[in-house]
Amino acid sequence: MSRYNPKLAEAKWQEVWRRREAFRAVEDPGRPKYYVLEMFPYPSGRIHMGHVRNYTMGDVVARFKRARGFNVLHPMGWDAFGLPAENAALENKVHPAKWTYENIANMRRQLMSMGLSLDWSRELATCDPGYYRHQQKMFLDFLKAGLVYRKESWVNWDPAEHTVLANEQVIDGRGWRSGVPVERRKLAQWFLKITAYAEELLGALDGLERWPDKVRLMQRNWIGRSEGLRLDFALRGRPEKVEVFTTRPDTLFGASFLALSAEHPLTQALARDNPALAAFVERCRQGGTSAADVETAEKLGFDTGLEAAHPFRAGEAVPVFVANFVLMEYGTGAIFGCPAHDQRDLDFARKYGLAVKPVVIPAEAEPAGYRIAAEAYTGPGRLANSDFLDGLTVAAAKAAVAARAEAGGFGRREVNWRLRDWGVSRQRYWGCPIPIIHCASCGMVPVPEADLPVSLPEDVEFDRPGNPLDRHPSWCHVACPSCGKPARRETDTFDTFVDSSWYFARFCSPQASSPVQRAAVDYWLPVDQYIGGVEHAILHLLYSRFYTRAMQKCGYLDVAEPFAGLFTQGMVCHATYRDEAGQWLFPADTRRAADGALVHAETGRPVSIGRSEKMSKSRKNVVDPEDIIERYGADTARWFMLSDSPPERDLEWTEAGVEGAWRFTQRLWRLAAAEGLPAPGASQPNEFGPAALALRRATHKAIRRVTEDIEGFRFNVAVARIYELANALTEFRGDPSGGAWALREAVKTLVRLAGPMMPHLAEELWQLLGHDRLLAESAWPEPEAALLVDETVTVAVQVGGKLRATLSLARDLGEPELRQAVLAEDKIKRALDGRTIRKMVVVPNRVVNLVV
RNA sequence: GCCCGCUUGGCGGAACAGGCAGACGCAUCGGACUUAAAAUCCGAAGGCCGCGAGGCUGUGCCGGUUCGAGUCCGGCAGCGGGCACCA
């Protein structure tokens, strides 16, 4: 028999699908729609295994849903703006646009070789003015709707390169190129008012039932709703008050200091005539802006010498510090510290010799002798040493403090959010220009809609750091649309998260002259199944949820939630290899020596094998999908991606695993291309012998299980079911009564079920089996209910919870018959050893447990 | 630092909603076919004890709930991921 040649077959079927426009999506209100979307890729130039995994899963869903009768939308595009293009420009003297579009062309070719059932007519790239003009239009709408504002905000500043750095460009507090310590600097920037939707974004999470719980939890924590109290502290010897925010007003009587942010107005005022403080504030600016940087930095404080009066005990006062861990962005930029009940405050108090007074006493502790040692106590308890709060629970004490503070006019209950507004300004070239003009007379003037898009200038130089838009000789100089006088364009561009916050909506009507065409989004949205990496669990998904609401407010569409279903896939990992010198090696540069040891492909020197880690270029543990597809074909790559590892978990790429997948494609070919099957259309026999019936049961059970497993995103289990059906087929030895018909049914079903995963091979076999219609256009089978239940079941019999025997019994036996059958069994009699049965626990058709 | 996740044979994993732990695959071993190899086909296999029937034990660790725990609860350990300018 001939072997299956994936190279020929894959090219052939891809061409057939393309010519027939088999995957083109057209709105059809008469049919139920299904929108499958994978997170679109950044066009880095080559697809990697993570893409293969992501797009294979999406394609399985798309092909499956299409076969189930849905009108499927499955588009692809490019998240094409971003920093790497500028880095490439800097390093290789190639224009970001040229670099990006060449990368897109190559990746499109690679994706096409995977045989994905995509509607390529809807392809878009976010760097195309035809895309980003609409983004500019919507920004102006958001501005009118009050969702946009401008304020000063902190950035990472590289003092050597005079440029703003991304967090990833800050390594150990230093610029990645210059190696110079990074400073925090303030810059006027554009913000989108995501906090206006904080309550709604939080509340709506409950309704996203087809999202992973962990993603919802991460978003919940990110939004970070907390109820607390704003409280005024009077200062001794100064007129100002310090307003603090606290979620633990109950611990107020344990307060031993106040801490202000380095950016707090009072700090700034004090620093003007206190050089030591000014120096400290300067020092706080060292280091990056990320949370990890701020929170792992050493906790530092500066005693201002001021004292703040306790709100409830005028005679008592606490020192006022400036501290580097207090964030101006959160709450009021000032806190009171209660060391006994907050670890960070405790560390701070120990360092600066401040009092540690416990005020919440755990139930099991003695109030008089209760002391705090190295760890703060944050659990429940009763209040002590706290005046009018003594004896109250934490919750009651919080309420009591709040009530008194409000009554006294020096406190206000408040809901605070960790969520901050979305800073969308980037001081970069390769992004969507922000359509604003700064005029000396008129202020900030929106670019008139007729002048959109504001396109990026093409004649830019990347010979030095900084934003080329800023130093462009002509681009930023423009007449003010309002007064006509010379004015200057905004040179910031949008965060690329803006681009990706609405592309799913654009896919519904990618050619529309407005951002979206209403009928199209009304039909297709929301996305029924979104698939991507868990690394986007918070930002991209939260921004998209906000952006969709903003679009809704401006009348572009009428859904609040963009993604009804979400699936987050795991990463693709591979073992790491090093040579004797400790240098990383690509797997492709190694081979197996005669004794099985791994050696360098050329030198034959030994190679040490490290643990499996996420594929990354820096560790060289990458396998190029193009090589795999070249050697084995796309179906093998797809099949391997789906076998073994549950999709949400990390997958380890192994050569042996790919070989196994390859062998199965050949095995399937042999099973289905075998001679001697009855022709299609042969009528179903009335009678089936036992072997034929058993095969039919296996076939129909496979249909049900594979269907359920694909629906439930258990692709690895679906693959196992397909193997089981293949095994049943292999074991089948024929049956004079209906055997041939049952065999054909099983083979046909096997091909049909494998179709979403190995579409080319399945299409080839489908044709070989004599079908006229394409598999890609054929329906999914329905299992016959009668074939799904067995007459006999295997019942496990336990004595005292231990398995003693398994019995093959008729289905749904009544308890008396069951008891009789169980007690007749020798093994059970022996296990009982004459003891009396106190109770018989029966799980129908599964387990009998005899309690003795 | 904070938040989140994961942990089952040699390996990846399966186990509906608390009910036969190890489906399915990979690797391994034995056999068939072959001059030989590859490919393919058949078979074995968690660990320990036993000639055997069989017994004991076993889902990261400690404890609990239950007739029954991989699954539920409490505690611990190890590993991984995210943290607002990478996408």
Image: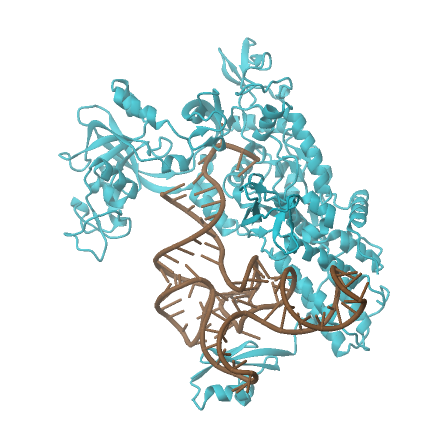
Chain colours: A cyan, B brown
Q: Residue at x 60, y 57 (%)?
A: A712
Outermost residue, top direction? A485
Outermost residue, left direction? A315
Q: Is residue A297 left or right of residue A551?
A: left
The percent position of residue A69, horizontal first and vertical second, equals 72, 54
The percent position of residue A579, horizontal first and vertical second, equals 57, 44
Q: Is residue A250 above or below residue A827?
A: above
For the N terminus of chain A, the image quarter is bottom right
The percent position of residue A77, horizontal first and vertical second, equals 66, 37
Q: Is residue A395 above or below residue A418?
A: below
Compare residues A647 and B27 and report the one nearer the observer. Answer: B27
- Count of marks overlaid on the render: 0
Compare residues A284 and A588 and report the one nearer the observer. Answer: A588
Q: Could one spot residue A510 in this view of the protein?
A: no
The percent position of residue A510, horizontal first and vertical second, equals 68, 35
Compare residues A164 and A512 and report the one nearer the observer. Answer: A164
Q: Is residue A309 left or right of residue A778?
A: left
Q: Is residue A256 left or right of residue A70?
A: left
For the C terminus of chain A, the image quarter is bottom left
Q: Could one spot residue A325 in this view of the protein?
A: yes
